[in-house]
Amino acid sequence: MAIFISILVGYLLGSISFSYVFGKRLKKVDIRQHGSGNAGATNTLRVLGVGPAIAVLLLDALKGIVAVLLGFYLAGEGLAPALAGLAAIVGHNWPVFLRFKGGKGVATTIGVLATLVFWPALLAGIIGILSIVITRFVSLGSLLFLLLTTLITILFRDHFMYPIEYAYLLIIVTILSFWRHRANITRLVKGNESKIGQKVKQ
């Protein structure tokens, strides 16, 4: 029952789309119909500006943090927090409140991983941020963050004493994220991916 509650609450938390809420409150627009069409922090930056984008980034990450902490509280370390975090990411990507059309789950994933596997996420996050600063490709930095967090966690799982469930979660989340970013990956390969601060290429 504890695992079921963790998954359900995690999904419902993830389904709260703060970029959609900010778009409606600030400009009376559906963020999914502007910019890249993605309900996330990067598109919020394009459509609404820096302040709302930072707020969305933090709140979306908080969804993942709260979901994982709830799993810890209800069932302890292991399967429950991992599934709760995955449910929050799935909720962000396919929110029940918005007819299952959401974002790509990067910020929520950051919150989940920072809570579950802090040190691998921190190291990978530094590299991801440097990549964004140097290349200005948010998508590339996001994918590097996911991939490196997964690799570091798996390679040094015994050192950090993480449950095996976390490694499985990371593999699933990484595959999901690469699939959600498949259009970005295609544009990166072709050299026409939009950079941060640049008008999105449809």
Image (cartoon, rainbow, N blue to C red):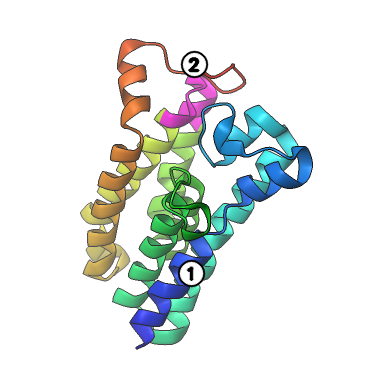
Magenta includes 135?
yes
Residue nearer the viewer, 81 or 42: 42
Seen at 47% across and 56% down, the residue is 95
Residue receiving disc 1: 67
Residue with the most extreme front position: 99
Mark 2 or 1, closer to the camera: 2
The Cα–Cα distance between marks 2 and 1, rounded to whole angstroms, is: 34 Å
For label 1, count other residues whose C-alpha is less than 10 Å away and answer few (under 14), some (14-19) or many (20+). Answer: many
Task: Report x, y in % for residue 18.
Answer: 62, 51
Our reading of the magenta stretch's main secondary structure is helix
Magenta includes 179?
no
- Work out whether 167 lies above or below 5: above
Provide the secondary structure element on which disc 2 rests: loop
Which disc, if any, is residue 201? Answer: 2
Q: Which of the two labelled residues, at mark 2 and mark 1, occupies the earlier sequence position? A: 1
Q: Which image quadrant: the N terminus?
A: bottom left
Q: Image quadrant of residue 128? A: top left
